Amino acid sequence: MAVTKSRPKSAKSTAKPGKTPPQAALQPAGNAEVLTLAEAATFLRVQPDEVLPLVGLQGLPARQIGTEWRFLKSALQDWLRSPVPRPSKQALLAMIGSWKDDPDLDDMLKEIYQQRGRPMTEDHA
């Protein structure tokens, strides 16, 4: 009596030859892992609410898709390797200019000089 080998039912492929199964098409290629905001925060070892300010202030690479944020793990690694960019003179002046109309600025300056034990103005005789 001849014995024939047959595949177990669980091993049968339902995909058509030459077609990529949908779940395989969704898998990232190589090291291109896409992270959510929470996963990116975990990877960077910071709180999730600290990640989005880094996108605007320090150029953290990210994409917003609808209301969700996505981060490429390899791009985060490259960002960590790169030096922190120095702000331009124009950016610094804009930031300083934002304090111009602050009603508490004079009081803060007086307190700073007082703590340092120095007068606000120095006499140059």
Image (cartoon, helix red, strand yellow):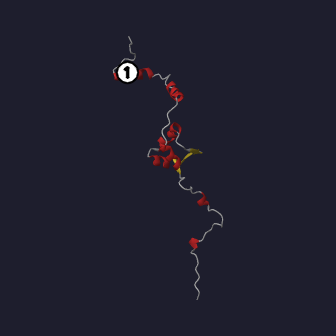
Q: Quadrant of the C terminus?
A: top left
Q: Quadrant of the N terminus?
A: bottom right
Please provide percent x and percent y for residue 56: 53, 38
What residue is at 51 percent from the left and 24 percent from the top? 97
10 or 34, which lies in front?
A: 34
On the picture, is 60 further left or further right than 123? right
Q: Tell me if I can see residue 92 in this picture.
A: yes
Compared with residue 13, is residue 51 higher up or lower down, i.e. above or below? above
Q: Tell me if I can see residue 67 in this picture.
A: no
Please provide percent x and percent y for residue 85: 50, 36
Compared with residue 116, is residue 65 higher up or lower down, i.e. above or below? below
Compared with residue 68, is residue 24 higher up or lower down, i.e. above or below? below
Please provide percent x and percent y for residue 88: 52, 30
Disc 1 packing (10 Å; few <14; some 14–19; many ≥20): few
Determine which residue is flagged by label 1.
113
Picture mark count:
1
The single residue placed furthest to the left in the displayed view is 117
Please provide percent x and percent y for residue 39: 49, 49
Q: Quadrant of residue 24?
A: bottom right
On the picture, is 20 further left or further right than 40? right
What residue is at 33 percent from the left and 20 percent from the top? 117
Compared with residue 91, is residue 35 higher up or lower down, i.e. above or below? below
The single residue placed furthest to the bottom in the displayed view is 1
Q: Secondary structure at mark 1?
A: helix
Q: Amino acid at mark 1?
A: Tyr
